Amino acid sequence: MGCRCIRIHERKEVELRQAENMRTGGDGNGTVILLELGTGMELRRYDMEAAVISATWHGGEFILGDLVGNLMGVDEFDVRWIKRMDIDLPFHDHSAPAATTSAHDCDDQLCSYVAVSLGRQELLLTHQGHVLATVPAPTRIACIWSSTSHEEKANDAASTLLCGGDDDG
Protein backbone atom coordinates (compact mmCIF):
# COMPACT_ATOMS: atom_id res chain seq x y z
CA MET A 1 0.00 0.00 0.00
CA GLY A 2 1.39 3.43 -0.96
CA CYS A 3 2.22 6.30 1.36
CA ARG A 4 0.21 9.53 1.19
CA CYS A 5 2.22 12.75 1.43
CA ILE A 6 1.37 16.32 2.40
CA ARG A 7 3.33 19.25 0.91
CA ILE A 8 4.67 21.60 3.56
CA HIS A 9 7.03 24.56 4.00
CA GLU A 10 10.29 24.55 5.92
CA ARG A 11 10.68 25.83 9.47
CA LYS A 12 12.09 29.24 10.36
CA GLU A 13 15.90 29.29 10.75
CA VAL A 14 15.73 31.27 14.04
CA GLU A 15 13.60 28.53 15.62
CA LEU A 16 16.01 25.85 14.40
CA ARG A 17 19.02 27.60 15.93
CA GLN A 18 17.19 27.93 19.25
CA ALA A 19 16.23 24.25 19.18
CA GLU A 20 19.85 23.25 18.43
CA ASN A 21 20.84 24.56 21.89
CA MET A 22 18.29 22.44 23.77
CA ARG A 23 17.26 18.81 23.89
CA THR A 24 14.40 17.12 25.68
CA GLY A 25 13.85 13.59 26.85
CA GLY A 26 11.06 11.76 28.59
CA ASP A 27 10.66 8.49 30.45
CA GLY A 28 8.06 5.84 31.20
CA ASN A 29 6.98 7.65 34.37
CA GLY A 30 6.04 10.85 32.52
CA THR A 31 9.08 12.87 33.57
CA VAL A 32 10.31 15.33 30.94
CA ILE A 33 13.78 16.88 31.22
CA LEU A 34 14.90 19.87 29.16
CA LEU A 35 18.70 20.02 28.73
CA GLU A 36 21.08 22.72 27.50
CA LEU A 37 23.07 20.90 24.83
CA GLY A 38 26.45 22.63 25.23
CA THR A 39 26.80 21.95 28.97
CA GLY A 40 24.36 19.10 29.54
CA MET A 41 22.82 21.22 32.31
CA GLU A 42 19.22 20.50 33.23
CA LEU A 43 17.15 23.60 32.46
CA ARG A 44 13.73 22.37 33.55
CA ARG A 45 11.87 19.26 34.64
CA TYR A 46 8.19 18.72 33.88
CA ASP A 47 5.74 15.93 34.70
CA MET A 48 3.19 14.39 32.37
CA GLU A 49 0.37 12.05 33.32
CA ALA A 50 1.81 8.94 31.64
CA ALA A 51 4.82 7.67 29.69
CA VAL A 52 6.29 10.26 27.32
CA ILE A 53 6.07 8.88 23.79
CA SER A 54 6.72 11.81 21.44
CA ALA A 55 8.53 15.13 21.26
CA THR A 56 9.03 17.68 18.49
CA TRP A 57 10.20 21.30 18.29
CA HIS A 58 7.56 23.74 17.02
CA GLY A 59 7.01 27.49 17.26
CA GLY A 60 9.65 28.12 19.92
CA GLU A 61 8.57 25.26 22.20
CA PHE A 62 8.81 21.52 22.53
CA ILE A 63 5.52 19.70 21.94
CA LEU A 64 5.37 16.53 24.03
CA GLY A 65 2.86 13.70 23.95
CA ASP A 66 2.12 10.99 26.50
CA LEU A 67 0.56 7.54 26.37
CA VAL A 68 -2.93 8.65 27.46
CA GLY A 69 -3.33 11.37 24.81
CA ASN A 70 -2.06 14.54 26.51
CA LEU A 71 -0.12 17.13 24.52
CA MET A 72 2.00 19.72 26.33
CA GLY A 73 3.97 22.72 25.03
CA VAL A 74 7.07 23.64 27.08
CA ASP A 75 10.06 25.93 26.73
CA GLU A 76 13.06 26.68 28.93
CA PHE A 77 10.91 28.85 31.19
CA ASP A 78 7.54 27.18 31.76
CA VAL A 79 4.71 24.94 30.60
CA ARG A 80 2.97 27.07 27.96
CA TRP A 81 -0.13 24.91 27.51
CA ILE A 82 -1.54 21.44 28.16
CA LYS A 83 -4.34 19.80 26.18
CA ARG A 84 -6.05 16.45 26.75
CA MET A 85 -6.80 15.00 23.31
CA ASP A 86 -9.53 12.70 24.69
CA ILE A 87 -8.19 9.95 22.48
CA ASP A 88 -6.47 7.06 24.25
CA LEU A 89 -3.82 5.19 22.33
CA PRO A 90 -4.56 1.56 21.53
CA PHE A 91 -3.20 -0.69 24.28
CA HIS A 92 -0.52 -2.22 22.03
CA ASP A 93 0.74 1.18 20.86
CA HIS A 94 3.83 2.72 22.43
CA SER A 95 4.36 5.66 20.10
CA ALA A 96 2.54 8.72 18.88
CA PRO A 97 4.70 10.09 16.09
CA ALA A 98 4.75 13.87 15.66
CA ALA A 99 6.43 16.42 13.37
CA THR A 100 6.25 20.17 12.99
CA THR A 101 4.87 21.45 9.70
CA SER A 102 3.56 24.48 7.85
CA ALA A 103 0.83 24.29 5.24
CA HIS A 104 -1.53 26.56 3.35
CA ASP A 105 -5.12 26.59 4.59
CA CYS A 106 -8.24 26.91 2.41
CA ASP A 107 -7.71 30.70 2.19
CA ASP A 108 -4.10 30.15 1.00
CA GLN A 109 -2.68 31.49 4.29
CA LEU A 110 0.52 29.85 5.53
CA CYS A 111 -0.27 28.19 8.87
CA SER A 112 1.94 26.38 11.35
CA TYR A 113 0.92 23.00 12.78
CA VAL A 114 2.11 19.99 14.69
CA ALA A 115 1.18 16.85 12.77
CA VAL A 116 0.53 13.97 15.16
CA SER A 117 -0.81 10.45 14.94
CA LEU A 118 -2.40 8.79 17.93
CA GLY A 119 -2.28 5.22 16.67
CA ARG A 120 -5.28 5.64 14.41
CA GLN A 121 -5.91 5.75 10.67
CA GLU A 122 -5.70 9.53 10.53
CA LEU A 123 -3.21 12.36 10.79
CA LEU A 124 -4.17 15.22 13.12
CA LEU A 125 -3.02 18.76 12.36
CA THR A 126 -2.92 20.58 15.70
CA HIS A 127 -2.05 23.98 17.11
CA GLN A 128 -1.41 24.21 20.86
CA GLY A 129 -3.24 20.94 21.35
CA HIS A 130 -6.36 21.91 19.41
CA VAL A 131 -7.17 19.66 16.45
CA LEU A 132 -7.64 21.90 13.42
CA ALA A 133 -7.86 19.24 10.72
CA THR A 134 -7.76 15.50 10.24
CA VAL A 135 -6.39 13.69 7.21
CA PRO A 136 -7.63 10.12 6.72
CA ALA A 137 -4.99 7.45 6.07
CA PRO A 138 -5.33 4.01 4.48
CA THR A 139 -3.61 2.40 7.47
CA ARG A 140 -2.57 3.21 11.05
CA ILE A 141 0.22 5.83 10.97
CA ALA A 142 3.35 4.44 12.62
CA CYS A 143 5.87 7.20 11.80
CA ILE A 144 5.98 10.79 10.59
CA TRP A 145 9.05 12.43 9.07
CA SER A 146 9.60 15.95 7.75
CA SER A 147 12.42 16.72 5.32
CA THR A 148 13.71 19.54 3.14
CA SER A 149 16.40 18.88 0.53
CA HIS A 150 19.16 21.38 -0.28
CA GLU A 151 17.61 21.85 -3.74
CA GLU A 152 14.21 22.67 -2.20
CA LYS A 153 15.85 25.18 0.16
CA ALA A 154 17.70 26.85 -2.74
CA ASN A 155 14.47 27.17 -4.73
CA ASP A 156 12.43 28.25 -1.67
CA ALA A 157 10.11 25.33 -2.39
CA ALA A 158 7.94 23.38 0.02
CA SER A 159 9.34 20.40 1.86
CA THR A 160 7.54 17.08 2.27
CA LEU A 161 5.91 15.43 5.27
CA LEU A 162 6.03 11.63 4.99
CA CYS A 163 3.79 9.28 6.96
CA GLY A 164 4.49 5.56 7.18
CA GLY A 165 1.91 2.99 8.14
CA ASP A 166 1.55 -0.62 9.08
CA ASP A 167 -1.05 -3.29 8.42
CA ASP A 168 -1.98 -3.89 12.08
CA GLY A 169 -4.55 -1.05 12.20
Image (cartoon, rainbow, N blue to C red):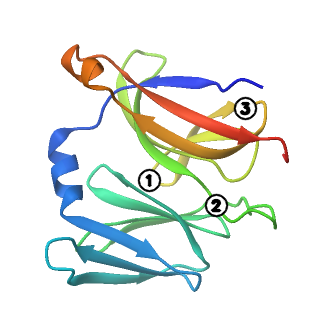
Residue 16 place in picture, x, y as percent: 22, 48
Query: Looking at the image, is mark 2 or mark 3 nearer the viewer?
Result: 2
Q: Determine whether, in the image, residue 19 is placed left or right of residue 127.
A: left
Nearer the N terminus, badge 3 or badge 1? 1
The answer to which image quadrant residue 37 occupies is: bottom left
Badges 3 and 1: C-beta atoms under 8 Å apart?
Answer: no
- How many badges with numbers are in the image? 3
Mark 2 or 3 closer to N-term?
2
Which disc number belongs to residue 128?
1
Q: Earlier in the sequence, mark 1 or mark 2?
A: 2
Element on which disc 2 rests: loop
Q: Nearer the viewer, mark 1 or mark 2?
A: 2
Q: Which mark is residue 95?
A: 2
Q: Secondary structure at mark 1?
A: loop
Give the Cα separation between the discs numbered 3 and 1.
Answer: 23 Å
Left or right: 83 with respect to 121? left
Q: State the CA–CA distance, disc 1 to disc 2.
A: 19 Å
